[in-house]
Amino acid sequence: MYFIKINDAVLPTPYYYSVTSRDIESSDSGRYDETGVVHRNRVRHSVKTCDVKWRLPGNSLSPLNAALGDALLEVNMLDPATGSYIDCEMYAESIRSDFYQHQNRSEPSSWWEISCRLVEY
């Protein structure tokens, strides 16, 4: 089982995975008429975003960063709402890399935490 595939490459298993579905509304949505009723004009339904975090050693960063680097990503991801995989065209927004080091009694260890939000086009 995997969580995310980008351009047919299976990504490492993330330690954090969160999928959000939201509607996209037109600019005239949310306006109230003279009787106080709000009007909603939905132009797209169930647009996906996926927040993902990985903890990886330094030598595993290049393949992940390469997979996230394209402007258009063909993503196959697990949809928790249905329990099945869905295909989306997405882009990676706000890629962040944080370094952590833990001092152990025997030897220090370190890792990188990579986080990003995948947004459906």
Image (cartoon, grey):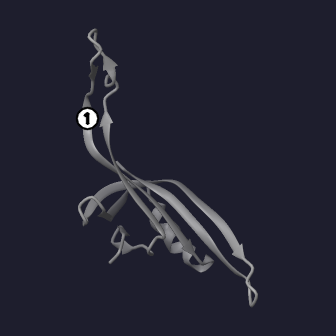
In this picture, residue 94 sits left or right of residue 26: right
What residue would you read off at disc 1? 43
Q: Identify the residue at image location x=68%, y=70%.
A: 100
| In the image, residue 119 above or below residue 40 | below
Residue 72 on image: x %, y %: 38, 55
Q: Identify the residue at image location x=35%, y=25%.
A: 27
Mark 1 neighbour density, 10 Å: few (under 14) some (14–19) many (20 or more): few
Residue 60 location, quadrant: bottom right
Instruction: Please state which amino acid type lies under the numbered disc 1.
Output: Val
Residue 88 on image: x %, y %: 30, 57
| In the image, residue 44 above or below residue 101 | above
Residue 57 location, quadrant: bottom right
Outermost residue on the front side: it is 36
Q: Nearer the viewer, residue 73 or 36?
A: 36
Say what secondary structure mark 1 lies in. Answer: strand
In this picture, residue 105 sits left or right of residue 12: right
Q: Identify the residue at image location x=35%, y=75%.
A: 2
